[in-house]
Every structure is written in C-alpha cells, then in structure tokens.
Image: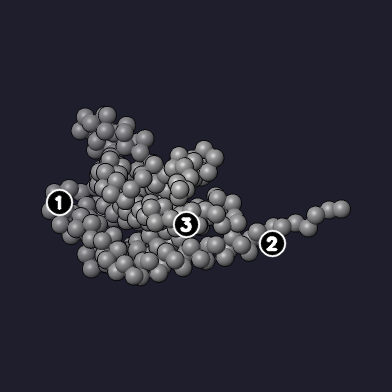
Amino acid sequence: MAKTPAAPGQVTHTLRALRAVTTREILKFVQQRGRLLSALVRPLMWLAVFAAGFYNVFGVSIIPPYKVYITYQVYIVPGLLGIILLFHGMQSSLSMVYDREMGVMRLLLTAPLPRWVLLGCKLAAGTALSVITCYVFLAICIFFDVTFDPIAWLEVLPALIMSGLMLGALWLFLSVYIRQVENFAGAMNFVMFPMFFFSSALYPLWKLREGGSELIYYVALANPFTYAVELIRFALYSQFEPVSAAVVTGATVLFFLLAVLGYNPQRGMIRRTGPAPQPA
C-alpha cells in the first residue's frame, strides 16, 4: 500500500518554523533599539567623513558598470551596503552563540524538523532584517547627494538577498566554532575587517594592480565579499554580473553546508560539547 506523502505537512511545519524564528528575530531587533543605529553608524561615518575627504581627490574612471565619471561617494555605497550585510550576519550569529550559552539552542535544534531547515529559517530571518537595514541606508544616502534610479531600488533587491544569504551563512558556519560571545570581538578583527578592506568595497581592484600591490590584488580576487559587492554594484545600475552571481551562490551553498555539518549532533558542535553533567 502506498504511503501518503508527507510533503504538505512538512511544508506547513517549515513555514511555521520560519514564521516563529522570523518573529523572534524581529522582536529582538525591535527591543534592541541600538542595533539598527550600530549597523548604520559605521557606513555613515565612511560616507560622511572618509568619502568627503576624498571627494575632490579620488574619482573613478569610466569602468563597468559606470558610463560616466563618478565621485568616490558614489563608488563606495555598494561596499557600505556590503558591510551592513556583513555586520548583520555577525549580529545574527552572535545571537546563536548567546542562545547556545543560555540553553535555548538545544531547544531549537530538537524541534521535529531537519536541522538544515531550522538553520535555513534562522538564516532567512537574519537576511530579511539586514536587507531592510540596507534600504534604510539607501534612503539616508539621498541626503548626501548619492542617488540611484528608482527602478534600481527594486533591481538591487535580489543582489542584496543573495549577498545577505552568503554573508549570513558564513557567520552561521563561524558560530559553530565561536564558543563564547566575547570571542566575537576577535572574529570582527580577523574576519569582518579583513574581508572589508581586502575587497573592491573602497577602491577598484585595477588600482591595486596599477599601484604594484599584486598580492593584495589576488587576495581581493579570492575574497567572496568582493563578489558580493560587485553583484550589488552592477545591480544598482540595472546590470547583471554573472561571475559574481556564480561565486556568491556557490559560496552560500558551501558555507551553509559547512554550518549544517557543524551543527550535526553526531559529528559537529553538539557532540564536542558533550552531555550535561548529571547530578550525583
């Protein structure tokens, strides 16, 4: 006798889990009022101070996706959107470590759903909040005379989602090995800032090569954050960059699979922590 397929029930449970995790993330985001401000302060400082200092010093030549000479302020906006996504991914994974310390993580991972579904819901919820923050930043950019075509606000959405998923999956994977909340300060110094500076977020890669920085040029080429920034940059000008899209998609799958493997109770983080000691 053929068994009744459980797919509809599985989809329903998955949607419920996504709603529950997303609601929890939104409530935490609303309660932590400084979180939005902290995510925006860093890119706004770069835009208002650093870019202003180079306004008349550093311009960008006519290279794709640009069709005219642009100011440095315009050039760095895609990179600043990327740093917002990177910072939000870190914040979301920081809550994973905190939940693990408080014991909430075990309750989440014992839910009657595949572990990859639960982690995927967590990733999707964090990405949604990071994309919303990116649009708030784009709105603030208008006051700095950095504007884009109205259609670009819609066309950049898939690029923001793809980049947010990749960077969120990276931090999700790193959260497997970060055992305490305090260790995230080191992760910022050794992961987030190197990814930001060794990329095309602040300067075109051809300028690195032209200046003789061959090593930094190749490091930036190997940096997945570079391709996330370029994907966003081209999307803001209604263009699609296939190489960046392929790298971002592949890196997302790789980081997420590594995260799922790390949270596997048989071989990952839960096994390493071991069972809780029993009272005598």
Under circle 3, the secondary element is: helix
The relative height of residue 166 versus residue 153 in the rendered view (above or below) is: above
Q: Earlier in the sequence, mark 1 or mark 2?
A: 2
Name the residue that disc number 1 marks.
54
* Quadrant assignment, res 139: bottom left
Q: Position of residue 40 (x, y in %)?
A: 27, 61
Q: Residue most toward the front?
A: 280
Q: Nearer the viewer, residue 220 or 272?
A: 272
Q: Nearer the viewer, residue 102 or 193?
A: 102
Under circle 1, the secondary element is: loop
* Quadrant assignment, res 222: top left
Query: Given contact means CB atoms under 8 Å apart, are the residues at marks 2 and 3 in contact?
Result: no
Which residue appears at 26% of the width and 47% of the height? Answer: 185
Looking at the rendered structure, the kind of residue marked 3 is: Lys
Q: Nearer the viewer, residue 57 or 94?
A: 94
Q: Badge 3: few (under 14), some or many (20 or more) residues near its Cα, within 10 Å?
A: many
